[in-house]
Amino acid sequence: MKKYILLLLIVIVSVSFKQINSSEKADKQLSIAEKIANAHGFEKWQQVKEIAFTFNGKRSWVWNPKTSDVTYIMDGDTIHYNTGKIDSSLVKIDRGFINDKFWLLIPFQLVWDQGTSVSEPIKTEAPISKTIMNKITLTYPNEGGYTPGDAYDIYYGDDFIIKEWAYRKGNQPKASLVNTFENHQDFNGIKIALEHKKAEGDWNLIFSNVKVTLD
């Protein structure tokens, strides 16, 4: 009887070891962009039916990512459109949506956006907190999109949660904007930073009225 128990324990330990080893191997195969996205709930995104938010108290949006339908609300105006059907009258509004969505969901844009390059991670001092963090640089191609050629230095912790970034317009050496990612909140599994502050402390970009609806 003892032999059977011992054999069973060996089998259980062996299976557990294989599962852990397989999980570690799968994790190593993920890109840095995927690890950052997953840390912010990207694996839940396929269940998202609708996401609503207000950008810095100005523009409000309701977006259905599965149908590409967008509702824009500002100053009493409400406009419905589809991102797959943009004409000249909608370019300004869509530009605003792309900008605001980018701020809201930059961890996911890392894996969504085509034609970009993501550098290998390095350890370096973050520009605002002055603490040592991980850093990658996201660079956009010189053609296509509303802001071609831009670059973002993204600073994140060992938990892959983004803490700061530096935006460099046109991939210039000097940053055009540097700010934090703060007040992360969980919305049905999607983690979003609701505040972004500069080092000076007199500027804070805020997301409010955030709601994530799942299927």
Image: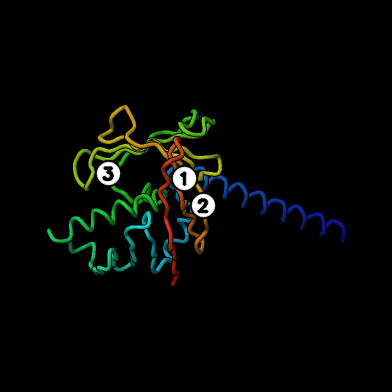
Residue 142 percent location from the top left of the image: 21, 38
Q: Going by the picture, which residue comes out furthest to the left?
A: 88
Secondary structure found at label 1: loop
Q: Residue at x 43, y 41 (%)?
A: 202
- Indicate which label's residue lies in the foreground, 2 or 3: 2
For label 2, the crowd category at 10 Å Cα-Cα, with few meaning under 14, some 14 to 19 and many 20 or more, is some
At label 3, the amino acid type is: Gly
Q: Is residue 12 visible?
A: yes
At label 2, the amino acid type is: His
The residue that mark 2 highlights is 184
At label 1, the amino acid type is: Phe
Nearer to me, 59 or 67: 59
For label 3, the crowd category at 10 Å Cα-Cα, with few meaning under 14, some 14 to 19 and many 20 or more, is few
Question: Which mark, residue 115?
Answer: 3
Secondary structure found at label 2: strand
Q: CA distance from mark 3 to mark 1?
A: 25 Å
Q: Are marks 1 and 2 in contact (CB under 8 Å)?
A: yes
Residue 3 percent location from the top left of the image: 84, 56
Residue 63 percent location from the top left of the image: 33, 65
The residue that mark 1 highlights is 181
Q: CA distance from mark 1 to mark 2?
A: 8 Å
Q: Going by the picture, which residue comes out furthest to the front?
A: 202
